[in-house]
Image: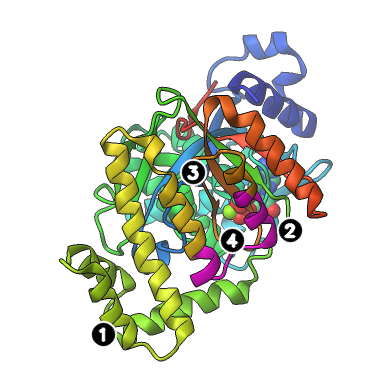
Amino acid sequence: MSDDEGAARARAVLAAAFGGPDDDPAADAAAAPGEDDVRVWAAPGRVNLIGEHTDYNAGLCLPIALPHRTYVALRPRTDSLVRLASAQAPGETWTARLEDVAPGEVAGWGSYVAGVAWALREHLVAQGADPASITGFDAAVDSSVPFGAGLSSSAALECSVAVALDDVAGLGLSASDAGRAVLAAASVRAENEIAGAPTGGMDQSAALRARAGHALLLDCRPGLDPVESAEQVPFDLDAAGLALLVVDTRAEHRLVDGQYAARRATCEDAARTLGLASLRDLADAVDASDDPAGTLAVSLDKLPDDVARRRVRHVVTEIGRVRELVALLREGRPDAVGPLMNASHASLRDDYEVSSVELDVAVDAARVAGALGARMTGGGFGGSAIALVRADQVETVADAVRAAFEREGLGAPGFLLATPSAPAERVV
Ligand code: ADP
Ligand code: MG
């Protein structure tokens, strides 16, 4: 979906749901600015190159923004009503008054959208500014980001709305990285507190702060200055003759709440046992050591059982792999990162135990067909895998993965190409 197409579709959904000047293109052209004007903003999905299950361990991760985007056509209102429609939720509109939006008070997909308005109002109140600059609005979305594929359609939705409301209210936050960090934080609050989904901040930072041709190195240590927490790392796939193939397993998202919570709790218990604030401290000690393996082994020996030892080993080695991969990219060697991706997958599969049959089949088939490296991406138990391939081998690798799924009796996967793309912005 091109930006023009995405914008046209979102506008059409808005007009169909709530009417307005789009009913008549001539009237639209004649509409005075500020009066019933619809504009369109977009925000990308994301894929994480490496650094999985590290965010809640104060670690490092390395997402890129996808070319796949969520488009929101939005028209501010003079009252506090929020009316929403989505091409992905056909035939239903979602309505609430802004003053009724609060934790536990709203549900459904509109909570991601109204949650952003709520969080921006909270931000303004905390700044001593007038929250009423965030008014109600009519909005409609359409998206090329697959739902629930681990590519963060939820953050794409929140962040498209965040830049839209920022623009409409004239807050100017989108204009700087520091401001975008504020919008990312508001989007995280919308997802955690209003939509009720416990996620870290990687997705929203990627959607708002990534840059085309770059990966975004995120440092998840709490309390870090938000601007210091993100660094751009050159990752120009086209120039290197490479492509990043995403395999959407289309397997039902089985990130069973219990599994995620259990991994988190094991990591937090282990850090406590080791007398550390987080496993990041151990990763840093291992990184600084003359004998990394020995330093890690001494700490692992202090843990109560094999499960805890394997979970910690994943987190510590994964943070190390992010550092190594970033170093290779900075040296201009993106074609050398494959083995790190492979090692990440093995660690997630064997030590962290969050892979799935579909993810393993995708990764193995991609490698056999010539991928330079492949790994599951996202939280696991379903979702997507990524394979780094030579640009002329994309079809060969995709065909091999498709054939392997068929052989194993799995449902057909989806494919998309992840070119590191631009962050959330106004498109019309
Ligand atoms: P993902 O990995 O895609 O982010 P999530 O479960 O976090 O999966 O978010 C998916 C949810 O986000 C959907 O169930 C829906 O509530 C909401 N959502 C995302 N994009 C859209 C959209 N274009 N229209 C309506 N709802 C959306
Ligand atoms: Mg999500």
Cα distance between the residues tagged 2 and 1? 38 Å
**Residue 239 sits inside the magenta stretch:** no
Residue at image coords 66%, 58% = 382
Mark with earlier residue (3, 2)? 3
Q: Identity of the amino acid at label 4?
A: Gly
- Viewer-side residue, 104 vs 232: 232
Q: Are marks 3 and 1 in contact (CB under 8 Å)?
A: no
Label 2 – label 4 distance at C-alpha: 11 Å
Q: Nearer the viewer, mark 3 or mark 2?
A: 2
* Residue shown at 46% from the left, 60% from the top: 200
Q: Earlier in the sequence, mark 2 or mark 1?
A: 2
On the picture, is 186 further left or further right than 89? left
Quarter of the C terminus within the rendering: top right
288 on left or right of 37:
left
What range is drawn magenta here? Answer: 348-364
**Residue under pointer 2:** 252
- Specify which label sits upstream in the sequence, 4 or 3: 3
Q: Which residue is mark 3?
A: 134
Res. 214 visible in picture? yes
> Neighbour class for label 4 at 10 Å: few (<14), some, many (≥20)?
many
Q: Position of residue 101 (x, y in %)?
A: 59, 58
Residue in front for this viewpoint, 224 or 299: 299
Residue 113 image point, x, y percent: 59, 48
